[in-house]
Amino acid sequence: MVMFEVSHCIDSDEPGKMKTFYMIKTEETGEIVLKKRRIAKALRRWLRENGVDYSSAFYIS
């Protein structure tokens, strides 16, 4: 499951710069929020290779 949500963050460091957050949810670990795409991809790959059910989404703010 992939969800997409766009919202503007007033507290942003730089105006106009958007940040992406990756959320991965499993029964074993709960909900994990990551800032780095590379780490999120690696975690999803590891979960898939080890047969763990997960859902993932990303948010842009």
Image (tube, helix red, strand yellow):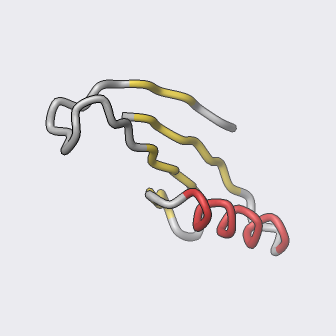
Residue depicted at x 37% and y 36%: 18
- Residue furthest to the left: 11
Instruction: Give the image location of residue 7, x and y in percent.
Output: 35, 25
Q: Nearer the viewer, residue 54 or 8?
A: 8
Lateral position of residue 9 relative to residue 55, left or right:
left
- Picture quarter with the C terminus: top left
Residue depicted at x 55% and y 29%: 4
The answer to which quarter of the image holds residue 43 is bottom right
Q: Nearer the viewer, residue 28 or 15?
A: 15
Residue depicted at x 67% and y 61%: 41
The answer to which quarter of the image holds residue 20 is top left
Compared with 33, 28 (above or below) is below
Residue depicted at x 57% and y 55%: 24
Compared with 29, 41 (above or below) is above
Lateral position of residue 57 relative to residue 44, left or right:
left
Q: Nearer the viewer, residue 42 or 53?
A: 42
The answer to which quarter of the image holds residue 9 is top left
Lateral position of residue 12 relative to residue 41, left or right:
left
Instruction: Give the image location of residue 51, x and y in percent.
Output: 83, 68
- Picture quarter with the N terminus: top right
